[in-house]
Image (tube, rainbow, N blue to C red):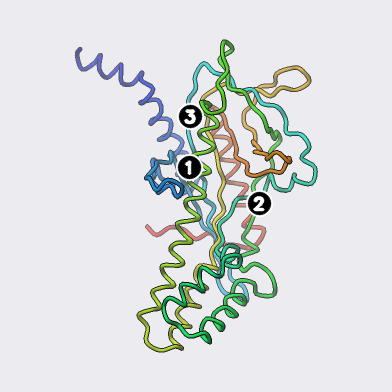
Amino acid sequence: MNDYDLESKLIASDSYNSIYTEEQVCGLLVKQGWSATHSGYYKDFSTGKWREVDVCAHRMWKKSDESGENKAIVQLVLQCKSIKGYHILFTPASNLGTWRWALTKLDHDWVGHRASANWRDIARNLEEMKLNREIITSATKRFQGIAYPDGFVKPYDLMVKAQRARVVTSAFRETNIGSTKDLENSVLWRASLDIASVIESEKEERWGRLIKDTRLASVIETSEDIEEFVCNNFYNYLSLVRLFHPIIVLDAHMWLIKDQKLEALQWCRFAQHNVLGDTRRWFDIVSQQYYPTYISRLTKHYENEFKKVDAEERKPRT
């Protein structure tokens, strides 16, 4: 085999197509002003193993008010999948009812919610550092004041919503007409689980950092300085919220079943419901051909949403 034949075969391979698509998806994000990473790695919280995510991107906005400066990071988590020769059939979501609001609510990571529910974790760590009860009680009260000034979540204004989707679906079939993949072998289903793993692992990693940083107070000598250190640490974490937007870019034909007919889909929002019909999570499924238009409109949406609340974008250092 000569070099030309080898190169031709490599370019025609699934591996080349996969990594090239990911690179293109990442490159378009950069052009839209996102800080994007191709093939990032994270530690899966449930297994302890290191895993790969195809593309991640983020932008940060900030806003100051009476409680100080607050920041929001919109983090896009993307998986790029190719199932050429396959068709994805979707049905519209039914019985959305009062749960329709959940379809624009972004999965988010704000340590205040978790700390309020799991304060014992922090209190136990403070006790293990041999802090006296007065410091722990005082820090607890100050935490509540920092987290919920005036009774609202500290970075509440920055917790914007995702764009609305014209089509919301809740069931699918992955078929090449001759056969249909079961759920465990579905490329789309596995991609959705991968994205969920990334988001949950990122939340756990940040919570672990809060606990670890709080324990640094053990090297401080005076009680007053310990309390100030702990509360300043709380302030830094409580001032930031991360908003996750999950996206699957798909190289496959997508169809919506409507009135016993098929309508070609460019993108849709897929709602994962539990057996009671509640929306557990959602993610956007976008055809590879439509992705440039989709990401341009998504970018404008977030820029406009933060503009509405008078937030200023915090550009990365160059």
Label 3 to label 1: alpha-carbon separation: 17 Å
Q: In the image, what residue occupies the spot 48% across and 61% down?
A: 207
Q: Looking at this view, is 296 or 184 the one in front?
A: 184
Q: In the image, what residue occupies the spot 60% across and 41% down?
A: 297
Task: Identify the residue position indicated by label 2 in the image.
Answer: 161
Task: Identify the residue position indicated by label 3 in the image.
Answer: 81
Which of the two discs, 2 and 3, sits closer to the camera?
Answer: 3
User: Which quarter of the figure has residue 158?
Assistant: bottom right
Pointer 2: residues within 10 angstroms few (<14), some, or many (20+)?
some
The amino acid at mark 3 is: Lys
Q: From the viewer's perspective, is residue 225 above or below residue 281?
A: below
The amino acid at mark 2 is: Lys
| Percent of width and height locating residue 284 | 60, 37
Q: From the viewer's perspective, is residue 278 above or below residue 136?
A: above
The amino acid at mark 1 is: Leu
Task: Identify the residue position indicated by label 1 in the image.
Answer: 29
